[in-house]
Amino acid sequence: MELAKLLAKLQAEVDIEESRKQLLTIKMENDKQNATAAGEAEGLRRASSVGQFLATLKPDLPESKERLAAYRFLAGQEVSTQRSSPPPARTWAAARRASSSPPMT
């Protein structure tokens, strides 16, 4: 009789551990899906920001290579890597025009 109770208790503990394993597996899959979705959303925000930045610069820098170089330069200058907004395109273009003007005497 004691052996039957001990076996039943042991089986119950095994069942509990199997349930925990299943829950952890499900949680791991959910966490992975959430991380993937967050990464995709960040990628879309970044792509939208880059597109807006390049479109804003188009009147001032008709060459796409120049616009891309401007974005890369300003993105490299960002202090915080947490930000996802584009660098200020009009400010950069104005500074570039000012630096390319002949010096005032």
Image (cartoon, rainbow, N blue to C red):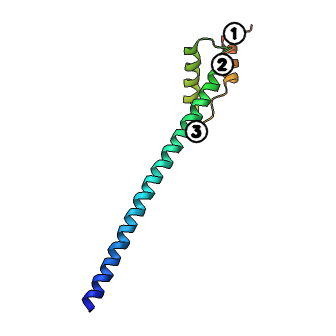
The one of 93 and 47 positioned closer to us in this rendering: 47
Quarter of the image that includes the C terminus:
top right
Residue 6 position (above or below residue 42):
below
- Quick one: label 1, few (<14), some, or many (20+) residues within 10 Å? few
Name the mark nearer the viewer: 2 or 3: 2
How much space separates mark 2 and mark 3, taking CA atoms? Answer: 23 Å
Q: Amino acid under label 2?
A: Leu
Left or right placement of residue 56 versus residue 30 in this view: right
Name the mark nearer the viewer: 1 or 3: 3
Q: Amino acid under label 1?
A: Ser
Write down the quadrant of residue 14 in the picture: bottom left
Write down the quadrant of residue 96 in the picture: top right
Which comes before the other along the chain, label 2 or label 3?
A: 2
- Residue hosting label 2: 57
Q: Residue at x 53, y 44 (%)?
A: 38
How much space separates mark 2 and mark 1, taking CA atoms? Answer: 18 Å
The one of 78 and 7 positioned closer to us in this rendering: 7
- Quick one: label 2, few (<14), some, or many (20+) residues within 10 Å? many
Residue 18 position (above or below residue 57):
below
The one of 89 and 19 positioned closer to us in this rendering: 19
- Residue hosting label 1: 101
Q: Residue at x 58, y 39 (%)?
A: 80
Describe the element under mark 3 as helix, strand or loop.
loop
Horizontal and vertical percent position of residue 19: 39, 68
Left or right placement of residue 94 versus residue 33 in this view: right
